[in-house]
Amino acid sequence: MEGVVKAINISKGKGVPKDPVEVANFIEDFGIEGDAHAGKWHRQVSLLGEESIQKIRDMGVEGLCTGRFAENITTEGIILYELPVGTRLNIGETVQEVTQIGKECHQHCAIFHQVGDCVMPREGIFTKVIKGGKVNSGDKITLA
């Protein structure tokens, strides 16, 4: 199973869409340097597949670009939510471990209010950084 990094997204605050960057520095047991969700916890990095985003586009939502679901890494070619917790992924120079599939959505986002659904709570995943390093848009994602 192999995928690719479509985009890397970061934000200074929580609860807001993230902005794309070409390259990011991932810090071991912390997350992405400069991202609001980084820290010593189990949800250091969030990932969402382009395939999942397309499901919402198919519901009629236009203008969805990477980072709108507040995901740090937008992927393509790998079905993230089918990976068991504990799976390790090689992403760029990093090794990341899947710690959680989906999440509880405490405050419904603008997308949910527009179409009555959001895919991140079901199909987004979270990882913690086991080995730090750089990740670039276009890097391959493989099982470690």
Image: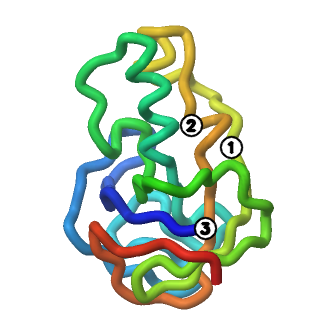
Amino acid carrying label 1: it is Gly
Between residues 128 and 11, which one lies in front from this camera angle?
A: 128
Circle on res. 36: none
**According to the image, label 1 marks what residue?**
102
Q: For the residues marked 2 and 1, what is the alpha-carbon distance in whole angstroms?
A: 6 Å
Is mark 2 in CB contact (under 8 Å) with mark 1? yes
The residue under the point 56% across, 30% down is 119
- Chosen colour scheme: rainbow
Give the side of residue 30 with respect to residue 10, left or right: right
Vertical placement of 45 versus 13: above or below? below
The kind of secondary structure element at disc 3 is loop
Residue at (32%, 47%) from the top-left corner? 18
N-term mark: 3 or 1: 3
Quadrant (top left/top right/bottom left/bottom right) for the C terminus: bottom right
Q: Earlier in the sequence, mark 2 or mark 1?
A: 1
Mark 3 → mark 2, Cα distance in angstroms: 21 Å
Residue at image point 48% right, 59% down: 37
Quadrant showing the N terminus: bottom right
What residue do we see at 30% from left, 30% from top?
64
Residue located beneath label 2 in the image: 120
The residue that label 3 is drawn on is 1
Residue 24 sits above or below residue 124 on the image: below
Instruction: Give the amino acid at mark 2.
Output: Met
Q: Nearer the viewer, mark 3 or mark 2?
A: 3
